[in-house]
Amino acid sequence: MRVPLGYKFILGFVGVVAVVALAPPVVAALGYAPGVTHFLTLVVAMTVGLIMGWLFSRKFARNIGMLTASAHEVSQGDLSRDIQLPPTRMPDETHELTAAINLMVQNLRDLVGHVRGSSLKLAGASRELNGTAVEISVSTEEVARAIEQISHGAETQAEQVERSSRIIKETAISIELVASRARESSRSARDTTLIARRGSELAGDALELMKEFFLQIEELCARFEQLNSRLQRVGKVADFIGEVARQTNLLALNASIEAVRAGEYGKGFAVVADEVRKLADSTSHSAGEITDLISSLRDESQKVHENLLESSRTIREGKKNVDVTAGSFGEIIASVQETERRANSIADLSQMQLESSAKMVQSIDEIARVADDNAAATEQVSAATEEQLVAMQDMALSTKELAQLADDLEKVVRRFTLEETVELVETV
Amino acid sequence: MSEERRFLLMQAGGQQYALPFEQVAEVSELRRLSPVPRAPAWCPGATRSAGVVVAVVDLACYLGDDPEQHPEKLVVLDLRTGGLALQVGPVSALVLEGQPALEKDGYGTWLITPDSKVELLDAGELVQEISAAMAR
């Protein structure tokens, strides 16, 4: 039965009062003098009061002492033991206090155990987080370096794209020049075609003129043949005259001889014979000159004839050459027309290349713009990565501090002694 | 009027020779010759002149030169000096006014003409020498 502590004090006081009230009659019954009786009564009352007070306060003091010792132990961090008060039939507030303190100790034990386990887990998790943060930091550094390289590569790419754009523009200019040259070649080929046609016409005219000239030469050769024939007849006549003169000379010479042999009578005849001989000499000389002249003329006419024949052969060869030239002009016209067609084709293709190069320039410009954007974005990513790296380093530092705090907490919690064995999970 | 002398100039073996007209019977063209047996080399044959057979002598060959390369004429000597004809090259007549200028030396007699100096032959001496040579 629970008896409150106040009741117990009241009951003790009542007992002391009852002893004090009942002691005088008992002492008086002993028959002692009033003084002695009074004294004895006082002594008996005080003794009974002390005994009852000691009886009443002994358990209470013991319980308070045990509670105080337990509180002291708890204050020292010893949570291993519960307070075990002696059993009584009349529990009071100290028992309730003991139960409450035991419950508190139990709760503290659970809390400390939980805190210790949590701190250990927190330390492990913090170290793990710190390791992860360090790894992330390292990875972030690598990512930052990679992004820096990408940024550098993007700048290089942008430069290369700009250079490519410049080269393609220069190529476009070259293509335009090629197209211009091709158009000029086409115009030149057209002019050449006209000139070749004119040359072909002139070659045809020259051919006709050469044919006419060739006929004239043949006619001239025929006339020279006639002239040679007549000159030969004249030469024969001159030879005949020369022969006659020679015979006359011989006759005159013999006549002179006969005249000399005739002596004085033949002197006149000798003179005549001399004159005849001189005339024959002169005739022979003239006939010789005629013969020489005719021979010279014949030689000259023969040379002229040969020259004419040679010229005729040359003209015939020239006619062949002119024929070949006319044919060559035809081939030149065909070739030049083909050249013109190809030049036009080159010009068209160059124009297409020019348009394609213009589109390519636009595409390259677009690529350059995208490359610039990529470079700028890469710069931003690089900056963000740098910030992330700093943040990760801060986080690693924070996790390190958190681990340190967890360790400190665990050390603090270790001050408490637990009855139960707390299962600690180290997560390192 | 001064005296005129007429000479017949003959070319034989590149040399010019002269004969007085009086010692010449005829000048004729070359004709076909009849060969003479055992005749010397300078005697290519014989022919007829005015009905008389005359021996033909290559004058150049006879005088020690090479035979006449282009013989043209036959000069028949006066038949009174002997029946002899000279085979020579071209001939011509030479008329000299007055007494002709002659030179004599160890090689023979030379007729001085306005243009040159030619050896003057004597038909009688020539016939005698040739006859003697043929006799050898």
Image: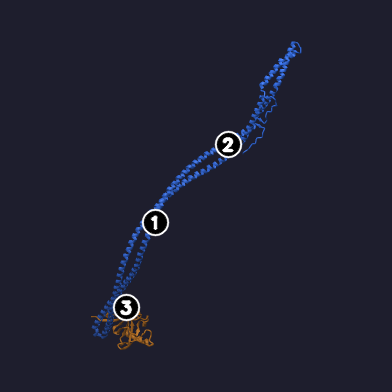
Chain colours: A blue, B orange
- Residue at the disc numbered 2: A399
Residue A352 on image: x %, y %: 40, 53
Q: How far apart are marks 1 and 3 (CA)?
A: 98 Å
Q: What amino acid type should be assigned to the residue bearing mark 2?
A: Thr
Label 3, on which residue?
Answer: B117
Q: Nearer the viewer, residue A27 or A186?
A: A27
Q: What residue type is labelled 3?
A: Lys
Q: Which of marks 1 and 2 is in front?
A: 2
For mark 3, name the chain: B
In the rendered view, tell whether residue A112 sits above or below residue A266: above
Q: Which amino acid does label 1 sit on?
A: Ser
State the image coordinates of residue A331 (x, y, percent, origin top left). 37, 63
Mark 1 or mark 2: whose residue is earlier in sequence: 1
| Horizontal and vertical percent position of residue B128 | 34, 86
Q: Label 2: few (<14), some or many (≥20) within 10 Å?
A: many
Q: Quadrant of residue A25?
A: top right
Q: Is residue B103 visible in the rendered structure shown here? A: no
**Mark 2 and mark 3: span between their CA atoms?**
157 Å
Residue receiving disc 1: A345
Q: Residue at x 35, y 58 (%)?
A: A190
**Residue A243, position in %: x, y?**
29, 80
SS state under label 1: helix
The lab-note entry on whether marks 1 and 2 share a chain reads yes
Residue drawn at point x = 38 percent, y = 59 percent? A338
